[in-house]
């Protein structure tokens, strides 16, 4: 009796899960095909004249400890080391779920949670750096900050924002 | 290619294995490899074949990416989008097979007695399949370290074979070592108390239960979006 019901419950759960996953993907694909007007509106509202360095903390929908740590460390760095540039809008910090934005993921060849620097001039992309080594530095905040800060400073110096 | 590079690849693999996010599949693999308590040769062979499965999967992926057939992001997103979601129900069904719940009298007859017997017996092919499946079930940590760490390293050193193989061995190493320790310890306890047959049976049941629990965990996290603080 217990065996029969355990079997039925587990089988039911397995098949419902498969059906739910299928339905979720169908809905998500339909949404992506139609485009997300909120995202587009936000992006156009943020276009800035002159040079801007956008620091993206890109993550998957499922977030592991390292993924949230990457975002926290990157956010801390931007707030602590680049407060003036952040206040002036030269540096912008954004968080993006790239699993829901496949075009974004393919554009920058993103494979997992990472930090991405996108340099824009008058709203047009000039260049970008994908900082994949953050994965090996999540347990060493000083090295993480040094790595990301070095890449940011190089971009800002190239733009003539900092000497 | 220097030893530093090879050690880095091995370390990437070990880091992948000991991080919390693939913990559920690692526990399932440990249970699967170590369940033949009384047959140490079988345990060792199972561990080696499981390692081979993981290594082959990484080797194939590395070859596809490095030769430029597909971009890293395409494969990574595809596997993370789909495989992890299928993995939950698959683990539940595999666990049910190991527990003997899927018999011909079951309300939904998915597997015949032959399949069930083979699953319970645990042929080495299952260890190979499990290695491949678990290797391809990328979570953010393994995707980050494989596609973001190992692949650039292998491309830089033009190593389609050696570094992915070392990485694959690294990902299996902690699991296999722990499984061996479990099997040897269980055998010792079983012999000490003259209860080897009972210990073997309980290890098989435990493996089935672990598979079912891991499947439920994967379903909750990757399909239903439930978040657990430790992951």
Image (tube, grey):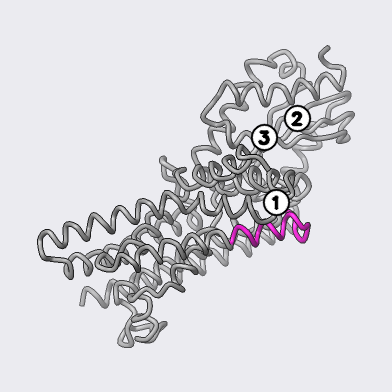
Give the residues in magenta.
B57-71
Q: Percent x, y for residue B74?
A: 71, 56
Which class describes the residues within 10 Å of circle 1: few (<14), some (14-19), or many (20+)? Answer: some
Disc 1 target residue: B159
In terms of secondary structure, where does tag 3 sit? strand
Q: Nearer the viewer, mark 3 or mark 1?
A: 1
Estimate the spatial distance between the alpha carbons at disc 3 and disc 2, rounded to whole Å. 10 Å
Residue pictured at 36% horizontal, 68% vertical: B95
The residue singled out by tag 3 in the image is: A115
Front residue of A84/B151: it is B151
| Quadrant of the image containing the C terminus of chain A | top right
Quarter assignment of residue B198: bottom left
Residue A12: image tag: none
Rendering coords of residue B205 (x, y %) = 26, 67
Vertical comparison of B225 with A57: above or below: below
Chain letter of mark 2 equals A
Disc marking residue A54: 2
Q: Residues within 10 Å of mark 3 (few under 14, many from 20)?
A: many
- Report which quarter residue A86 is drawn in: top right
Question: Under tag 1, what secondary structure?
Answer: loop
- Position above or below: B204 against A103: below
Along the polypeptide, which appears first: circle 3 or circle 2?
A: 2
Please indicate whether residue B157 sits to the left or right of residue B107 in the image.
right
Q: Quick one: quadrant of the N terminus of chain A?
A: bottom left
- Chain under numbered label 3: A
User: Toward the viewer: B8 or B2?
Assistant: B2
* Element class at badge 2: strand
* Mark 2 Cα shell of 10 Å, populated few (<14), some (14-19), many (≥20): many
Which x, y percent locates residue B82?
Answer: 58, 62
């Amino acid at each position: 009796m217990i065996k029969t019901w355990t079997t039925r419950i587990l089988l039911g759960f397995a098949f419902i899960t498969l059906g739910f996953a299928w339905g979720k993907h169908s809905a998500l694909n339909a949404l992506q095909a139609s485009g997300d007007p909120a995202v587009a509106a936000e992006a156009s509202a943020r276009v800035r004249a002159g040079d801007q360095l956008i620091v993206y903390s890109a993550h998957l929908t499922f977030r592991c400890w390292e993924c949230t740590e990457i975002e926290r460390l990157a956010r801390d760095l931007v707030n602590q080391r680049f407060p003036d540039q952040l206040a002036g809008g030269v540096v912008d910090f954004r968080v993006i779920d790239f699993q829901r934005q496949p075009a974004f993921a393919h554009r920058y060849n993103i494979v997992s949670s990472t930090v991405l620097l996108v340099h824009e001039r008058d709203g047009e992309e000039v260049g970008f750096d994908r900082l994949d080594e953050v994965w090996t530095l999540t347990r060493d905040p000083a090295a993480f900050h040094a790595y990301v800060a070095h890449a940011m400073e190089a971009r800002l110096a190239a733009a003539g924002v900092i000497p | 290619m220097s030893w530093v590079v090879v050690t880095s690849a091995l370390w990437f693999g070990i880091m992948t294995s000991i991080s919390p996010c693939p913990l559920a599949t690692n526990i399932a693999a440990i249970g699967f490899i170590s369940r033949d308590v009384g047959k140490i040769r079988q345990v060792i062979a199972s561990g080696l074949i499981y390692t081979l499965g993981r290594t082959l999967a990484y080797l194939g992926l590395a070859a596809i990416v490095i030769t430029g057939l597909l971009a890293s992001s395409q494969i990574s997103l595809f596997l993370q989008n789909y495989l992890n979601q299928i993995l939950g129900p698959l683990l539940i069904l595999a666990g049910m097979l190991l527990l003997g719940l899927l018999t011909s009298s079951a309300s939904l007859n998915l597997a015949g007695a032959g399949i069930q017997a083979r699953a319970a017996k645990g042929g080495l092919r299952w260890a190979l399949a499990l290695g491949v499946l678990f290797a391809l079930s990328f979570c953010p940590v393994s995707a980050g370290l494989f596609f973001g760490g190992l692949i650039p390293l292998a491309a830089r050193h033009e190593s389609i074979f050696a570094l992915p193989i070392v990485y694959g061995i690294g990902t299996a190493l902690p699991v296999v070592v722990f499984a061996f320790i479990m099997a040897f310890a269980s055998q010792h306890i079983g012999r000490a108390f003259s209860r080897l047959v009972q210990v073997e049976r309980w290890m098989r049941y435990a493996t089935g239960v672990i598979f079912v629990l891991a499947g439920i965990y994967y379903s909750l996290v990757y399909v239903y979006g439930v978040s657990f603080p430790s992951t």
